[in-house]
Structure formats: C-alpha cells, structure tokens
Amino acid sequence: MSERIGPEQGLEILQDGRALFIDVRDPESHRQARIPGALPLSQAGLEAFLAATDRAHPLVVYCYHGHSSQSASDFLSEQGFQAVVSLDGGFEYWRRAYPDQVETGDDLPAG
Ligand SMILES: O=S(=O)([O-])[S-]
C-alpha cells in the first residue's frame, strides 16, 4: 500500500517543488481548477505517462476526496514508481484550505 500524506505535508512538497502532482480526477475538473502545475492523468493518457516518466521521480497523487487516489497510487507503485503518495482530503479539502494554491481555468502552469 502506498503512503498517504496530509494536506500540510502536500503543501510543503508543492512549495519545495520536489514532486510531480498527479490529478486523477476527470479532465474537465482538472481544466477548471487544480493544484498548480499538476499533471492530469486519465486512462487515455496512462500509457504515454508510463512510457515517459522516470520511476524515481516522486509523485503526489490526488483525486476529489482522497479515496481513488489511494488505488491510483498503489497502481503506480506496482508500475515501479519508487516514491508515490496519496494526498488525504483530495482537491476538495485542498481548495478550501489553500485557496491561493489553486490554479484555475486555462492558466498556464507556473514555470
Ligand atoms: O475522488 S474520490 O474517490 O475521493 S470521491
């Protein structure tokens, strides 16, 4: 089972820039609002993601409430990713706790 982290730890990791945030919600939800710089990952993009991503790159996976991100994290661990965590509370908690850490609409990811 992959590790879970709380939102405070997620914020620290985001600010350190040491992990890739993976958004497993539906693509439209991602387009509307997301954790800054997060990558949308759906079934359709999975193969390309697995082919292109370094297994050593730390990943923080999030969904709506922190449930489906746990199975997505387990799956990514099984695919060889060495540092995968699931974000407790998901985006719904995150957007209320850290409204200034939400990117919306078609804003380009920072950096
Ligand atoms: O996205 S969710 O599985 O936490 S409802």
Image: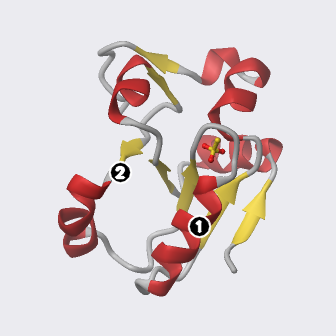
Q: Amino acid at mark 1?
A: Ser
Residue 29 location, quadrant: top left
The local secondary structure at tag 1 comes to helix
**Where residue 21 sits in the image (x, y, percent)?**
50, 49
Is 64 situated above or below 107? below
User: On the rendered structure, is 54 left or right of 73?
Assistant: left
The residue carrying mark 2 has its beta carbon less than 8 Å from ligand 1: no
The residue carrying mark 1 is 71
User: On the rendered structure, is 89 left or right of 109?
Assistant: right
Going 27% across and 62% down the picture, which residue do you hit?
46
User: On the rendered structure, is 83 left or right of 6?
Assistant: left
The local secondary structure at tag 2 comes to loop
**Where residue 39 sits in the image (x, y, percent)?**
37, 45
Q: Amino acid at mark 2?
A: Leu
Q: Which image quadrant shows ligand 1?
A: top right
The residue carrying mark 2 is 41
**Where residue 76 sits in the image (x, y, percent)?**
46, 74
**Where residue 103 sits in the image (x, y, percent)?**
47, 20
Residue 4 location, quadrant: bottom right
Going 41% across and 30% down the picture, which residue do you hit?
30
Going 49% across and 75% down the picture, which residue do you hit?
75
User: On the rendered structure, is 82 left or right of 92?
Assistant: left
